[in-house]
Amino acid sequence: MNTGDLHLLTGAYVLHALPPGEHADFERHLPGCPSCSEEVRELAATTGKLASAVAVVPPPVLKQRVMARVAAERQAPPVVPRQSRRGGTRRGRALSRFALAASVAAAATFGSVALWQYQEARDARDAAQRTEGRAADLASVLAAPDAKAVSGGFAKGATGTVVVSRTLDKAAFLASGLPNPPEGKVYQLWFADGGSMRSAGLMDVSGTTGAAVMEGPLDGASGIGITVEPAGGSAQPTSDPLALMTLPA
Amino acid sequence: MKAAVHIGGPASAGPDLQELLGLVARGDQNAFSQVYDAVGGSVLGLVRTVLRDPAQSEEVAQEVLLEIWRSAARYQPSRGSAMTWILTLAHRRAVDRVRSAQAATDRERRAALLERTPAYDEVTEQVDARLEREQVRRCLRALTELQHESVTLAYYRGLTYREVAELLSVPLGTVKTRLRDGLIRLRDCLGVCA
Ligand SMILES: [Zn+2]
């Protein structure tokens, strides 16, 4: 097919009306042809109007199903993976700890047995085997059969998830979108026991994601908190918590 | 050429989808819930128009929405608006499904096509959506018969241009051209910016 013909395929291309061979030919042509690129952008936007014209009111159950699955699905890794973590395999890194927590959270929230829950739990156990030390502890909490989770948003778009296993008597905290703490400061986790705060150790944040198994047993803790403290941590919080979350029952 | 009808302007009102997709890419389920509210009806409507079967349509729409969740980080604003990205993905998946089912049901499918059932049956009650639908219909009516048939058979029925040519008994080259100039006329009528 000559180039002159290719320029005429913009319409068929955005309508997905080309057979695979011609589709591939056109996609090879596209990056080098500014006029086709511009036309494809405009005509694709036009087909979007054709879609909007046939919009329906989706049944509410569809959203429920999608949101339940969303809580369990791993996302594609971000386009710019910065620091490589020590010892992590490619596969291990792609499996974000946050997504892992979210999957367990969903498994816990939507209690009925389903295949995907089993798969998610198995993936979490596999992740535990692939990683080491603290990460393995983390995975064991996330993958505990009785793990329950709550998520919440806090300062400036950051979100946190706390996962609790009563049988392991452990909790884990995972944060996403957190900035690195200011110079000379650290993030410290706390169990809230009635009116008092009990230190649950420090949490490393690298590349806006932090995850840690909280030190110490749950005991009577009703919630968890996270504060910014001087390097090394404090015996009692010295700043207002960035987040306070109630533990799942 | 008639005056353009502008539908909601280049950037539609409501939450900024591109911004929301950025949050979705970082795992924000609340942002995804808003994305769902903004696009769910169009995604399901489009998939159902192409597939016809309600149960299969919900299944495919669900897969499309989950794919948006999973691959939000891959959205490239330079390629077009977030809405276009989402609806292009939805159309691709619907077409893939209708073609995978095609071998088995080809004959029935062609029979159904020839009935020329209207492409739009069940529609949203929202006023702005209804207005938009009317404008699209008006602009579709402004196409030539052959442009109109070619574009709607390809888009709403998921036919390849070769199938459109067979169905309408016109040469392949003619269909390719009509798909392009039909969409160009629609673009101008609707006042679509990329
Ligand atoms: Zn070209």
Image (cartoon, helix red, strand yellow):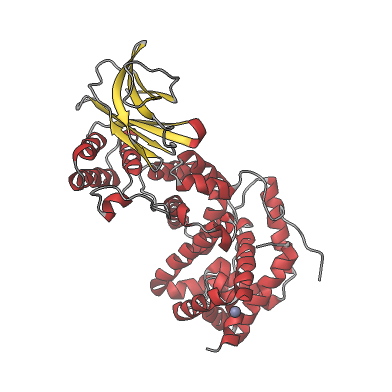
Q: Residue furthest front?
A: A184
B34 sits left or right of B69 in the view: right
Q: Position of residue B130 (x, y in %)?
A: 69, 51
Give residue A241's position: percent from left, percent from top.
Answer: 43, 22
Is B157 on the left-hand or right-hand side of A111?
right
Instruction: Judge whether A159 appears above or below A78 on screen.
Output: above
Q: Position of residue A130 (x, y in %)?
A: 20, 48
Image quadrant holding the N terminus of chain B, namely: bottom right
For ligand 1, give the image quadrant.
bottom right
Quadrant in the picture for the C terminus of chain B: bottom right
- Give the residue furthest to the top: A195
Using the rendered image of the protein, determine whether residue B150 is visible from the camera's viewpoint.
no
Residue B40 visible here: yes
Residue A113, compared with residue B111, is above or below; it is: above
Q: Give me the residue at 67% from left, 46% from top.
A: B13
The residue drawn where x is 24% and y is 39% is A135
Write the residue at 22% across / 36% down: A134
- Image height of B165 relative to B30, above or below: below
A90 or A186, which is in the foreground?
A186
Residue sitting nearer the eye, B122 or A127: A127
| Residue A20 shown left or right of residue B139 in the figure | left
Could you say which quadrant of the image residue A45 lies in?
bottom right
Q: Position of residue B112 (x, y in %)?
A: 52, 70
Q: How many marks?
A: 0
Question: What residue is shown at x 43% (from left), y 65% (from top)?
Answer: B97
Closer-to-camera residue (B21/A115): B21
